[in-house]
Amino acid sequence: MEHQSHLLTWITFLPLLGMFVILATPGRAKEFIKQIALISTLPSLLLGIVMISRYDPAGGMQYIARHEWIRSFNIFYFMGADGISIPMIFLTVLLCPICILASWGINDRAKGYFALFLLLETGMLGVFCALDFFLFYVFWELMLLPMYFLIGIWGGPRREYAAIKFFLYTLFGSVFLFIAMIVIYIYTSSFDLTKLGAEIAGTELHTAVGLKWWLFLAMFVAFAIKIPAFPFHTWLPDAHVEAPTAISVILAGILLKMGTYGIFRISYPLFPDMALAFALPIAIIAFINIVYGALVAMAQTDLKKLVAYSSISHMGYVMLGMAAMTPEAMNGAMLQMFNHGCITAMLFLLVGVIYDRAHHRDIDGFGGLAKNVPVYAGISCVAFFAALGLPGLSGFISEALVFLGSFPVFPWITVLSTSGIVIGAVYMLWTYQRMFLGPLNEKYASLPDCNVREQVTLYPLAFIVVLVGIFPHLVLNLFSPTMSNLIDLLVK
Amino acid sequence: MHTYELLAWLILAFPLLAFVIQIFFGKRLPRQGDWVPVAAICCSLFFGLILFFMVIVGEHDPNFVFQVSYPWFSGGSLQFDWGFHIDNLTAVMILVVTVVSSVVHIYSLGYMQGEDFYDRFFAYLSLFSFSMLLLVLCDNLFILYISWELVGVSSYLLIGFYFWKHSAADACKKAFITTRVGDVFFFIGILMVVLYIGEFNYTKVFEAVAHGELTGWVLTIAVVCLFGGAVGKSAQFPLHVWLPDAMEGPTPVSALIHAATMVAAGVYMVGRLFPIFSASPAAMLVVAYIGLITAFFAATIAITQTDIKRVLAYSTVSQLGYMVTALGVGAYTAGLYHLMTHAFFKALLFLGSGSVIHAVHTNEMPSMGGLKKKMPITFWTMLIATLAISGVPFFSGFGSKDAILAASLEFGMTHWLHMPIFLGLLLGAGITAFYMFRLIFLTFFGEAREPKRYDHAHESPYSMTVPLMILAGLSVIGGFGLYGGLWFNHLVVPPVIGDAAHHAAEGHGAHGSALAHYGAMALSILFATGGILLSYLVYYKKKISAEAVAGRFPVLYNLSFHKYWVDELYGKTVIAFVMWFRMVLARFDNKVVDGIVNATAPALRGVSSFSGAWDKYVVDGLVNLIAIVVQAVGAVSTLIQSGVIQNYLMKVGIAVGAILLLHNFILRIF
């Protein structure tokens, strides 16, 4: 029996503890509930920092906890972290306290909101920590439930439509994931994600190419819905528009990454040969995501919808990188997952700031704001330029790595995808102009600038965006060895 | 640490530090912190001058290169480094950038006094200076691209400095996006170079190209793509449209970024990557012709513009075309020399125009006139710059432009097919002299066309005129680098990479044949004089009426005045297409992609109501049928079982009677 670590268990379940405290608190103690919620996300953040500082990038899977759970089905409570999960876990524990702060204005049924939020955090962290397929699936589904209620109860006017669409769409994907998991279990009698790849190679499933093709496709559909890959993306704009600010941040910042995370964690190691077979289709979908997402973003008048479509475009870079499977491309894809998490979180927080004041999100309904809200305009400028891939900010490094890595494999798709660089600049700068530049819209002449709470949510992310832009190796080195092992597995 | 290394660090560190201080604390500092960036750029100038003299005078070696590289990060298989590459070209560029930047910083103290966001203006200037110096100092393609984009964003921020004006907000967006189109090509070029060579470092790439690791049509495409970056940044045709609009920025910005330094970055890049460019003669021809088209076409636009800054903007586009053409025909030294001289006299022209605008509060030359007496320093310094750009002997532009003409003549003499390059440039030189003197005559001579503006006009303060005088001095002595094989000619030569490249570079540059040299010189003086004379007749003596000429050739006049309708063309084609296409896609996304998703809802509802009906009427119906049957049987039996004894007896009697009857009936049959 290997050495057991409880670190990931603590990180994952501490928020759940906070949820129980909140449930035991009377609902009218709203401020107290908010404080409890904030306090119960902070230990996970601190432990997350400990986790990174003590992580050995070259040391493979770490912080392993493995206990028998359901003996008759060979199911384990199996947690662990490697280079693929470490950045995602950190992103989650970082964004959650920020989102609690961004939710400070929620007073309607606050008890339920914050309790569900903490349950959501546990679910998300569990997804990134689980190394048992069944456990992964349990967390994957667990996360859906609070998300459904958070959109469906605290969302905008069309919240019920959006929540049901999100729920059913994801559930639809989950069914495929579940079927794939069961079929794989029937062949291997195992749920151990770290060993399944090798075990599949040892069973007759290995030679059943047709079945493997279907299994890979089934899992890809499940993950593609989460990414979201074209044409499974339409739940995202609706969910974003209706969701409260903090939930949009979580959706774009973390939930989308679960799709690509699942591909890195499950699809690729389990079926490396199918990964190669699917590389070209994934690259084509990536191209569509990048260019189509950017062009549709350009057509939006709702700021939140624009940011939602920009997410679709930016997740395309992740897919392009993962399809190319070269070291630069894979590292770029992974880095893009982290960077997009920070940048898009900033963008959604910024949307929330203006929505709280103006009570609308119509891009053309602003104008000239830079003159009277300089702090807000300044941070927006950083976020917008990060999103359009300005060098010196983090998004550039990951995009450049993806392009450098995918060019040798898919020269034409890469060249065509670089048009996303221009279109990205077009819709970002155009939006910036319509909101912040030009003559001041007199309606907003007395708009208050960002308050301290809002600045506290934005500055850490801006700091990370600049830091990673200048010192990308701080994040890259975390997963570069893991990625290189994965590449060896794929193209051996 | 080596001295050069230390100097490079210091030159970069001061503006960067000033930017950080100014953006975070500028507002709280005395005088809104304007002295921080000014002091910083003066420090950079000081160390830049040391670097310049150490390299040019101290080393005095055409092949001098100092390189230092620091590891940055590893992408997996590619190593990303950053570092300094210092040679004679770097030294010259450092001199140009720090001198012009310092002068513009000081000038801005006066010009921008009392403007809103005064502190931020200086922060952006510092950011620009840092990025531009990094662009000049860096040692590899990746950092070049990064600094390339960073100067782009500083340019965006400064063009949009008066962001509350619609025109400024439009212009900064246009500038960033148009140059980004070029940047994407630049990036694809880098991708191709890295794919075949696996390195970013200049020297390693040059060596690999010299060894033939990247050849043939792939090399040509890669070079053309790299050149795309220069087309965007140096405002070459067809991506030149952003530069005239960029004049919406404050005038010191136009002088620094959109005349002297940033727009020359494209030319510098071609010069820096000359060993790659010169390895592909086909791509070099593309470079030469794009430069020629730009040089000529922009000059013809400048003739009819009335906004003083727009004339200078088109003049800049045209002069950049000269530099690009020079590099395209292999005249490395001449092209880069023109970059240097142009930086000084064009910065001077812009700052001078700023001084004029400051005095009369308009950009329109028809509203000026007769300002010579009111603003003598501005007039005389601008006149010097005009003489320089027109190519009058003893001023700096003469030497550099003459060298370009000589090189293109020589190129035409060896390749007769390409003689139009020389002819186009020569004619362009005449047009340049014409429109520049038109500017001088309209602004400073004749009667005051708007007396109200004229009466309020006055010479600018010393913070603005001293920079003009410094630049005027440089516009004169800047020309002496080329005469008699002085330092520039000798030192700024194409880098020698292996033997093959050495031979290719031989015979180009400013060492032309005597015939080409003196022939070009004579013709260029002739054309410059012709241009000046014509301008004198039209705009000073008024012997020829400009309006009459315009009336005689309305098509030509309109082409020039409306800038060949290039903006309108883009608006009607590319932009219209994108604007249409995005709506098509959005509708497709909404109606088709999401439509299918939403259609599954009614479809599912249909299925579920069918299965509901099945369940209700068939499955449940069977159950109910049994119940109905049982019920019916029950109902029938209730009729029989009335519970009344007499009834039962009667029924039994009927039954018995019936049985007996039946019995007899059956017996009778058998």
Image (cartoon, coloured by chain):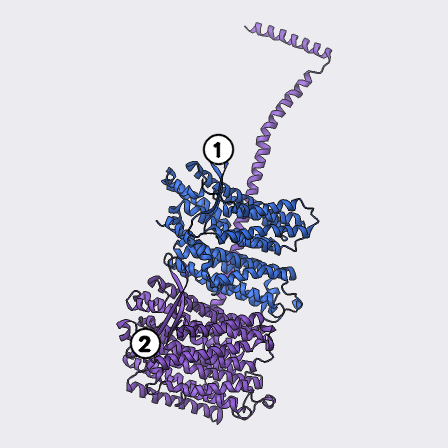
Chain colours: A blue, B purple
| Side of B605 where B145 appears, left or right | left
Q: Are marks 1 and 2 in contact (CB under 8 Å)?
A: no
The correct choice, above or below, for B207 with respect to B108 in the image is above
Q: Are marks 1 and 2 on the same chain?
A: no
Percent position of residue A69, x then y: 51, 37
Residue B562 can be seen in this image: no
Give amino acid for label 2: Asn
Among all residues in the image, which is located at the extreme front?
B1
Of residues A213 and B129, the one drawn nearer to the viewer in this rendering: B129
Under circle 1, the secondary element is: helix
Relative height, residue B297 to residue B220 (above, below): below
Q: Secondary structure at mark 2?
A: loop
Q: Which mark is residue B585?
A: none
Q: Check disc 1 and give the amino acid type.
A: Ser
Which of discs 1 and 2 lies nearer the camera? The answer is: 2
Image quadrant where one finds the N terminus of chain A: top left
Is disc 2 surrounded by few (<14), some (14 to 19) or many (20+) residues within 10 Å? some
Residue B121 location, x and y as percent? Answer: 55, 75
Q: Which residue is mark 1?
A: A72
Above or below, B658 against A481 in this view is: above
The one nearer the camera, A100 or B650, is: A100
The part of the image, by quadrant, that contains residue B504 is bottom left
Q: Which mark is residue B63?
A: 2
Measured as percent of width and height from the top left, residue B625 is found at 60, 27
Please tell me which residue lies in front, B15 or A391.
Answer: B15
